[in-house]
Amino acid sequence: MKFASTSHLVLIPSYNTGPKVYDTVREARAHWNPVWVVVDGSTDGTAQGLQRMAADDPGLRVWLLPHNQGKGSAVLQGLKAAQAAGFTHALTMDSDGQHPAALIPAFMQASMQRPDAMILGRPVFDASAPLLRVRGRRVSNWWTNLETLGAGVADSLYGFRVYPVAGLAAVMARQPWMRRFDFDTEAVVRLAWRGVKPINVDAPVKYLTAEEGGVSHFRYGRDNVLLTWMHLRLMLEFFVRLPVLLVRRLLGRPPFQE
């Protein structure tokens, strides 16, 4: 069943995933209206294919970035357009087929019940998940838990989420980071600092093989360096905030609020 909304949309950043992006968009459209795709400088021909799909589907819109700028930049482009169109919330999902489109309505319903919160996917891994990736994310989760004083973020990296559009756009406008692979983690930390409560919902994640059309742009060395630099920045800012946060907690107030 396809649901339609004037407040909540699906936002899919995409970069060189090949034909798998078409399956992802079709599955998302089968469950929600509208679906927006931001093509982040793809060179695999999918930009043109997505534009053809959108020409025949009024519930699908496609934006093209002139060159690859990173996932966060693609999401920000979508957020700005969503604000201009009057949308209040956006569910982000990857274009490579890893995220469960069938759960879009459930996540959107959870967001509509708690529009002040961010609805975060808590990944349920199967045998396809690379062990190094599963173990490595525990490190990022540990740092995120510290940086948010245990706000309740179950997973810092899983990108299947519903964000409040205005809050996230404001966060990104105030600093130049979270434009690439650092987007997902820094987004939840900074939103928690603004007082946005995380609500975690279980969601499966599927790592597709090359034969299944799976494409990964994750690079262990490059992206782990980026995450390390991100957590260093966040910790430095956390220590600056810490005295105020502790006072607020002692007074029984929400510790994070900008």
Image (spheres, grey):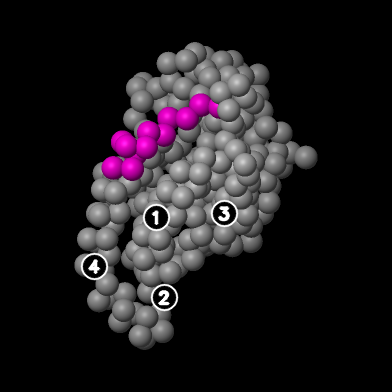
For the residues labelled 3 and 2, say whether their Cβ atoms are less than 8 Å apart.
Answer: no
Q: Around disc 1, counting alpha carbons within 10 Å, would you say few (fewer than 14), some (14 to 19), or many (20 or more)? A: few
- The kind of residue tagged 3 is Arg
- Could one spot residue 172 in this view of the protein? yes
Q: Which residue is mark 2?
A: 254
Amino acid tagged 4: Phe
Query: Is residue 34 visible to the viewer in this orientation of the structure?
Result: no
Evaluate if marks 1 and 4 touch, with contact meaning CB atoms under 8 Å apart.
Answer: no
Spatial separation of the CA atoms under disc 2 and disc 1: 26 Å
Which of the image's four quarters has the C terminus? bottom left
Question: Which residue position holds label 1?
Answer: 139
Q: Is residue 250 above or below residue 55?
A: below
Pointer 4: what residue? 239
Three-letter code, disc 2: Pro
Q: Which mark is first along the chain, 1 or 2?
A: 1
Residue shown at 49% from the left, 41% from the top: 82
Q: Residue at x 51, y 59 (%)?
A: 154
Q: Which residue matches tag 3?
A: 122
Question: Secondary structure beneath disc 3?
Answer: strand
Are the residues flagged by discs 2 and 4 in contact, CB closer than 8 Å? no
Q: Secondary structure at mark 1?
A: helix
Side of 175 where 54 appears, left or right: right
